[in-house]
Image (spheres, rainbow, N blue to C red):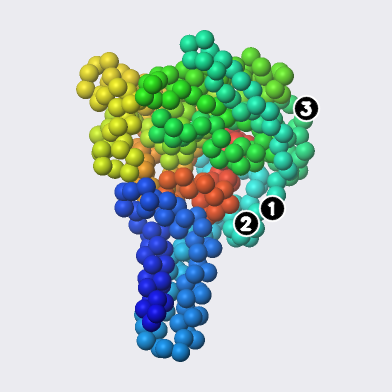
Amino acid sequence: MRFLLPLLAAVAAGLSLLNYTRAPDTVLTWKLALVAGEFGHWLVLLPLALGAAALFAKNPEWRITTLVLCAVAGVGFLRPAFTAWRMSRTLPARLEAAFGSKPAPVVAVFDPARLFWHPAAPAAAVATEVFARSDAGPLTLDFYAPQRIPVDSRAAVSAARPAACIVVVHGGGWDGGDSAQFVGWNHRWAARGYAVAALNYRLAPRHPWPAQREDVLHAIAWLKANASRLGLDPHRFVLFGRSAGGQIAAAVAYGAHDPDIVGLVALHAPHDMKFAWSVSREDDALNSIKLLRQLFGGPPDTPDRAALYESASGQLLARADSVPTLLIHGVPDTLTWYRHSRRLDTRLQELGVRHYLLEFPWATHAFDYNADGPAGQLTDYAIAVFLEQVTRR
């Protein structure tokens, strides 16, 4: 038992170090990094308790070692919250510089109280609509009706005007996932006056690319055709996607040249699929080579498949008149390399497209799982400001 305290302190310290470095490339360590980063403000209670136990333990052996390890763990677990607070001091100005006008205070940039206490938002009415295609069978679309009760008088959306619509494209490696991912975010946006359409699309390997792009385009067409009864504006769509969904959303937003698509938000997503192939391995956490083979039928080594890869690559499809874009990525992301977003950021800068890349130095893939965690709060603010700016027209 005399080794128990230092052993537990060592485990806590090791877990907290995942907030400083990229986790080993496994699914388990990715999940541990997600917990350490977005729930570290709760986990800090563990080293505090262990340190107190070491101070008052009758047996003083390993006391100093335990206290040092607890200090390392405490600092590591609090790093995300502290870094998020520091970033929050300059984020409004950076978003203003990127999108050209001073953002209204839709939500707090970062509120330490939200890390521990989540104020309940008004519930948004939800209706599920179904659209069918003769060649694909029924695909469901979850429609979240815009809430007409103002959450904040400064951010209230006028009930007299049809709502802008956020089209949510789910992640899941192109062969999994569904529209039920992260529904809390959908309720949050609907409560702020936006219509939200979370769609399902056909999955690989049974349905390779470009089936996913076609399904998103069909969903947008269906929303336009039903805009009047749904209470949404058919000329103000913002595409939103996470991971694989971000890749699909970007390919549609940049490739469709639809003037009714007014913005793109992509979280921890790949945007150059040839580059994705070049840096993928069979032994990485997701077996990325397998995922890309399923999506495209093989490597980009023939003209036909090379064209497929290019048609799925937002970075290659972007033009000077592409829609304003918000990119969000964690630098130590284990599943999707942060350089995917940085390379698109560079390309958009070259083209002169209004955009902003928000990077988190501690956050791994799916950091928005905790919507009120350190990365979740900054993401919430950035998206809220972005939506307000691009849907004003």
Of circles 1 and 3, the one toward us is 1
- Looking at this view, name the residue that lies furthest to the left: 301
Residue 262 visible in this rendered orientation of the protein: no
Element under disc 3: loop
Q: Could you tell me residue 47's position as x and y percent? A: 47, 72
Q: Is residue 74 left or right of residue 156?
A: left
Q: Could you tell me residue 65's position as x and y percent? A: 36, 80
Q: How far apart are the alpha carbons under marks 1 and 3?
A: 28 Å
Which kind of residue does numbered mark 2 sit on?
Arg
Residue to which mark 1 is pinned: 119
Of circles 3 and 2, the one toward us is 2
In the picture, the quarter occupied by the N terminus is: bottom left
Residue ID at (34%, 54%): 23
Which kind of residue does numbered mark 1 sit on?
Pro
Front in this rendered view, residue 252 or 133: 133
**If you read the primary sequence from the N terminus, does the residue marked by circle 1 or circle 2 appear first?**
2
Answer whether labels 1 and 2 touch (C-beta < 8 Å): yes
Which kind of residue does numbered mark 3 sit on?
Ala
Residue to which mark 3 is pinned: 160
Residue ID at (59%, 17%): 131
Using the image, tell me which numbered label, if any, was put on residue 114: 2
